[in-house]
Amino acid sequence: LLRSLSPTVKKMDLSAAKVTASVAIAVVLWWIWRTLKWVWFKPKMLESYLRRQGLAGTHYTPLVGDLKRNSSMLREARSKPIKLT
């Protein structure tokens, strides 16, 4: 009796592993999609809406943003001392 059940049990274990792997892949893909929407698609969409309304500005760059521009402006501002008199 046990010998006849073992192939069925193996098939069920394999089937459960496939379902678990499929769910895990689906969750990872969902997480990647949400992250891409948050980091890239939504900011670019908002940038497009603002440009259509006539607001000009720097283009969206994820992670660094306007860091290079801000640091150069800060360096320029610090190089010119303020006269206090």
Image (cartoon, rainbow, N blue to C red):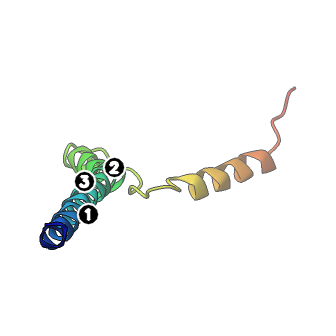
Q: Is residue 81 above or below residue 8?
A: above
- Dot 1 surroundings within 10 Å: few (below 14), some, or many (20 or more)? few
Name the residue carrying label 3: 30
Q: Residue at x 83, y 41 (%)?
A: 81
Name the residue carrying label 1: 21
- Dot 2 surroundings within 10 Å: few (below 14), some, or many (20 or more)? few
Q: Amino acid at mark 2?
A: Ala
Left or right of 54, for residue 35 = right
Q: Position of residue 33 (x, y in %)?
A: 26, 56
- Residue 13, image quadrant: bottom left
- Residue 54, image quadrant: top left
The foreground one among 64 and 24 is 24
Name the residue carrying label 2: 56
Q: Is residue 54 above or below residue 3?
A: above
Q: Position of residue 24 (x, y in %)?
A: 28, 57
The foreground one among 56 and 40 is 40
Q: Amino acid at mark 1?
A: Ala
Dot 1 falls on a residue whose secondary structure is: helix
Left or right of 67, for residue 58 = left
Mark sitting earlier along the chain (1/3): 1
Q: Residue at x 18, y 73 (%)?
A: 3
The foreground one among 85 and 70 is 70
- Dot 3 surroundings within 10 Å: few (below 14), some, or many (20 or more)? few
Mark sitting earlier along the chain (2/1): 1
Q: CA distance from mark 2 to mark 3?
A: 33 Å
